[in-house]
């Protein structure tokens, strides 16, 4: 009996060690933290924007963005902003400030919007951003004013500036002003441009698809919308695709092709932000020459 | 009528103090003169005398971003440079929506001409396709305004007749002679007319949807200082200063959009804020729920593993020890 007890106590010690070790392993698994609830699978965009008048180029201008969920998400939001480069107008006429953020806040619409929309309830956002063109990186700041989306008619989304991008280029700055929409002129409205089709309201987005796993919603700018497709005016308001009840491994893709009669004079930019349950979890800055 | 005006003023003041106290949101008037920023500054200075802050839209982007804000009580459009018309034409649908939703606008000069057809046929219903030049009158070069229909608020503090500096004014011409302003959007009053021709020089429009606009088809000025119709001479004209202040105040006080949105601004922000909080909260709840489920699953697996381990020990290991 004495020998049996001795054996049992060593066995019990081993069992205790196994118990404790396994408990530690289990609880370390339980506390596993996913760094980012989404993973971006694809972000394609043309490096140069061509207008339809450019007869030497027939490149399809395809924009494609895709991501997968790494955990369950109640509300997943993909927010597009399209911006065009322009010369900044500074409040008071001259550039002020020592660092980029101060300089950016001295640009007239940004400064005015910060003053007019600053509040604790629905604050404006200032995000660090970085875009690159031809292997050159441009760091800077992205300013977004959600109040403009809150109080404007979604049908005006192509005309109303909601966001600004200011990038550093050596000692100079590159400044963009933009709309909350998938692309410029989504609802047409080209002014002083004669379209070959003769229809002034034709959208710059030829066709668009929003996919969630195997489920696809298609949009077309054709005068006669193909069966099962929706018109371009039906695309999500303010370039904001919202998905509810996302489960782990769901994939989402937004694809569209662009045809424009007139391209912006300088660079343009596309900023895509991904929010999981209201928290910013991803941001892509696509600079297009 | 005076009493109603006083009550409206008091209500606006109370609204302003209420919102300002809670959110520091000040109402403002946007002033756009395109590529004549000095002119816009001078107009803003006049409007500031009304007690409402004027924001100079020194770039198109200021109008594009700020027009829809609830604090935007009125927009003054005084652009005269054809290079600014491209923006104004492109943005016309938004101005029209702004008016349709009860917004207030004041348009000077080119806004009332067919150069900007998309707003001169709607918000500023003059549709001027012809002009008559102003005249030299003593030190002034301009046109004489005489009272036609009295509109409370617009005419306050002004004589029945006075001269305003301007190069010319626009009117709607047809083969049958000049046409009176007309609009399907609401009620029109011609408040002032030119003394000789009888053509409209100030037209008010009260939209059926609660919007208000004031059209001033004169006020054509230039940026050349040596010319008698230089903008500097217009903005120092005492009657014009009163006229502009009255026009902005009248349009803004009657604007249903401003009264409604500005009055409910704090509530709208709280609603949006709580909507965002709900999204975050439900996300947190879901994350917590999923991590709890994961924990229970791991504990279950662990318990199964322990039972299996116990089974191995008692079934195979202990008997060997005992037999050994």
Image (cartoon, coloured by chain):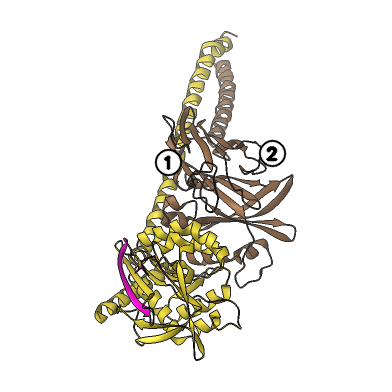
Q: Position of residue A220 (x, y in %)?
A: 47, 36
Determine the image quadrant of residue B52: bottom left
Neighbour class for label 1 at 10 Å: few (<14), some, many (≥20)?
A: few
Q: Colour of chain A?
A: brown
Name the secondary structure under disc 2. Answer: loop
Picture coordinates of residue A230, whole percent (x, y): 42, 36
Q: What is the residue that sits farthest to the front in this orientation? A: B175
Front residue of this view, candidates B288 and A133:
A133
User: Where the C terminus of chain B falls, by quadrant?
Assistant: top right
The residue pinned by badge 2 equals A56
**Of the numbered discs in the image, which one, if any, rests on residue A234?**
1
Hey, which quadrant is residue B164 in on the image?
bottom left
| Picture coordinates of residue A255, whole percent (x, y) | 54, 36
Q: Nearer the viewer, mark 1 or mark 2?
A: 2
Placement of B227 over or under A148, stated as above or below: below
The alpha-carbon separation of the residues under discs 1 and 2 comes to 33 Å
Residues rendered magenta in the picture: B171-194
Rendered residue at 25%/80% (across/down): B3
User: Is residue B139 on the magenta stretch?
Assistant: no
Position of the N terminus of chain B, as image quadrant, is bottom left
The first of marks 1 and 2 along the sequence is 2
Left or right: B92 in relation to A258: left
Q: Are marks 1 and 2 on the same chain?
A: yes
Q: Nearer the viewer, residue B301 or A266?
A: A266
Q: Could you tell me residue A19's position as x and y percent?
A: 55, 27
Residue at the far top in the pictured view:
B323
Disc 2 is attached to a residue of which chain? A
Can residue A134 be spotted in the picture? Answer: yes
Q: Within 10 Å of the Cα at label 2, are there few (<14), some (14-19), or many (20+) other Cα atoms?
A: few
Q: Colour of chain B?
A: yellow
State the residue in front, B296 or A255.
A255
Identify the residue at horizontal 54%, vertical 45% (top origin): A195
């Amino acid at each position: 009996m004495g020998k049996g007890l001795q054996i049992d106590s060593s066995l019990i010690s081993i069992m205790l060690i196994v118990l404790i070790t396994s408990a530690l392993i289990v609880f370390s698994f339980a506390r596993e933290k996913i760094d980012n609830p989404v993973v971006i699978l694809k972000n394609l965009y043309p490096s140069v924007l061509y207008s339809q008048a450019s007869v030497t180029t027939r490149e399809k201008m395809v924009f494609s963005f895709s991501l997968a969920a790494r955990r369950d998400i109640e509300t997943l939001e993909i927010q597009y902003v399209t911006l065009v480069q322009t010369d900044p107008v500074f409040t008071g006429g001259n550039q002020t400030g020592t660092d980029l953020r101060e300089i950016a806040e001295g640009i007239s619409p940004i400064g005015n919007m910060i003053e007019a929309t600053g509040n604790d309830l629905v604050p404006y956002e200032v995000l660090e951003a970085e875009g690159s063109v031809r292997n050159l990186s441009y760091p800077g700041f992205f300013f977004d004013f959600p109040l403009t989306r809150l109080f404007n008619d979604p049908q005006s989304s192509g005309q109303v500036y909601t966001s600004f991008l200011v990038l550093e280029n050596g000692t100079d700055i590159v400044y963009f002003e933009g709309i909350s929409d998938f692309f410029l002129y989504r609802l047409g409205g080209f002014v002083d441009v004669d379209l070959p089709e003769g229809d002034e309201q034709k959208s710059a987005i030829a066709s668009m698809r929003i996919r969630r796993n195997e489920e696809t919603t298609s949009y077309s700018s054709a005068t006669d919308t193909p069966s099962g497709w929706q018109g371009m005016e039906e695309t999500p308001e303010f370039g904001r695709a919202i998905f509810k009840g996302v489960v782990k491994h769901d994939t989402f893709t937004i694809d569209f092709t662009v045809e424009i009669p007139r391209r912006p004079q300088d660079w343009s930019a596309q900023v895509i932000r991904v929010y999981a349950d209201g928290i910013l979890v991803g941001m892509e800055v696509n600079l297009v020459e | 009528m005076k009493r109603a005006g006083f009550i409206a003023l008091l209500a606006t003041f109370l609204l302003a103090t209420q919102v300002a106290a809670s959110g520091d949101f000040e109402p403002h008037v946007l002033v756009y003169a395109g590529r004549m920023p000095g002119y816009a500054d001078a107009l803003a200075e006049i409007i500031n005398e009304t007690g409402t802050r004027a924001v100079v839209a020194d770039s198109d982007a200021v109008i594009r971003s700020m027009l829809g804000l609830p604090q935007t009580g009125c927009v003054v459009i005084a652009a005269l440079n054809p290079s600014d018309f491209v923006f104004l034409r492109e943005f016309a649908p938004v101005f029209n929506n702004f008016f349709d939703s009860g917004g207030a606008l004041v348009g000077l000069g080119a806004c009332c001409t067919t150069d900007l057809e998309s707003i001169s046929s709607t918000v500023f219903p003059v549709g001027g396709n012809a002009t008559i030049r102003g005249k030299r009158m003593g030190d002034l070069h301009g046109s004489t305004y005489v009272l036609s229909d009295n509109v409370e608020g617009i005419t306050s503090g002004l004589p029945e007749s006075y001269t305003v500096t301007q190069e010319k004014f626009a009117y709607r011409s047809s083969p049958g002679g000049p046409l009176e302003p007309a609009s399907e959007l609401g009620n029109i009053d011609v408040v002032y007319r030119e003394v000789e021709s009888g053509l409209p020089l100030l037209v008010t429009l009260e939209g059926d949807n609660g919007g208000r606009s004031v059209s001033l088809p004169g006020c054509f000025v230039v940026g050349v200082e040596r010319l008698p119709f230089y903008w500097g001479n217009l903005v120092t004209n005492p009657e014009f200063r009163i006229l502009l202040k009255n026009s902005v105040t009248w349009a803004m006080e009657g604007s249903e959009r401003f009264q409604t949105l500005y009055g409910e601004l704090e509530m709208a922000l709280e609603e949006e804020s709580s909507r965002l909080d709900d999204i975050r909260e439900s996300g947190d709840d879901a994350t917590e729920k999923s991590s709890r489920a994961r924990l229970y699953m791991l504990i279950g697996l662990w318990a199964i593993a322990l039972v299996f381990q116990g089974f191995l020990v008692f079934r195979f290991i202990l008997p060997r020890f005992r037999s050994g």
